[in-house]
Image (cartoon, rainbow, N blue to C red):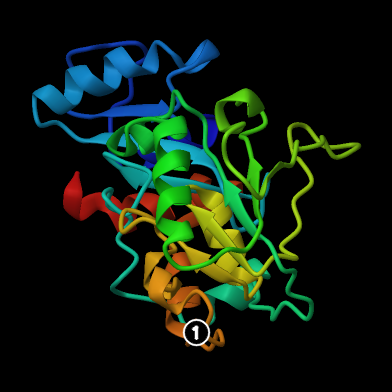
Amino acid sequence: MDAFVRSANDAGIHVVSNNMDCDAALIWSVLWSGRMRPNRKVYEHYRAQNKPVIIADIGALRRGITWKVAINHLTAEGYYGHHENLDADRPRKLNVTLTTNAYHGERILLAAQHDQSLQVQSAGGVVNWLNTTIDRLREHTDRGIVIRPHPRSPISAKMFRGRTGIRFEQPRPLVNTYDDFDLNFNYHAVVNHNSGVGIKSVLAGVRTLVDSTSLAYPAAISIEDLERPYDHDREQWLIEICHTEYTTDEITQGIWVKRLKEKL
């Protein structure tokens, strides 16, 4: 937030704190939970007036090093300005690369999101998304399914007791990290609604199924391609996705202002 304030001031944008009568707002995340719960009031207040809300959040490309910056939403419904004026060398500069998963497991991972996030509102909540997704998958495959809850949004296994071929994977905190958790992509496919897991899955070279609101959607597969060989051109998507996140130094330099100013 210090980096944002400095760069905004340098760009001639007057910044005040905790004010509901500005031309635009800056908030952290769209997860209406815990200390971030009051942000919902700010978000809805400014959007009701058709004023832009700048949203910052933890990055998916290099967690703790790069940070998402978008206008009005953190999904593809928001504005990142990542389709024009692109630097083809940006993936290298951020040290973000594409890999190909050498080992594809037999099961399908359903990576859930936090139930209080604005990102899953359109899906009717996480449990509804899981049940609907399982039903869709069963129309195309009988593979085993692994449900992975969001680390801070528990899901009761009892809700799926009548389902066959369902397992649960509990995220485990990584030692010496602030809030990072283990996650491997040794699966036949990864299914995610529209969070950072979908982006990471595409980067890892795994069949990825996401909602059309996901930033990973351009490089994802359709459910009809679930059992077909995965051969997707990800190069252009990689360049574009690397223009949705910034390092702290880049935020301080105001690069986000230049990319987003059209919608401000």
Tell me if residue 73 comes above or below residue 200 in the rendering. Answer: above
Residue 97, placed above or below residue 153: below
Residue 121 rendering spot, x and y as whole percentages: 32, 32
Q: What is the quadrant of residue 25 in the picture?
A: top left
Q: Which residue is mark 1?
A: 235
Residue positioned most to the right: 175
Question: 235 and 143: which one is in front?
Answer: 143
Work out whether residue 231 or residue 99 is closer to the camera in this orientation and state it: 231
Q: Position of residue 10 (x, y in %)?
A: 38, 41
Going 53% across and 60% down the picture, which residue do you hit? Answer: 199
Looking at the image, which residue sits at the far left?
A: 49
Q: Is residue 161 visible?
A: yes
Q: Which class describes the residues within 10 Å of circle 1: few (<14), some (14-19), or many (20+)?
A: few
Residue 53 image point, x, y percent:
27, 33
The kind of residue on which mark 1 rests is Glu
In the image, what residue occupies the spot 72% across and 77% down? 101
Q: Is residue 21 above or below residue 170?
A: above
Q: Quadrant of residue 187?
A: bottom right
Instruction: Tell me residue 170's x, y (percent).
Output: 75, 36
- What is the tally of numbered marks visible in this picture? 1
Write the residue at 61% across / 34% down. Answer: 150
Name the secondary structure under disc 1: helix
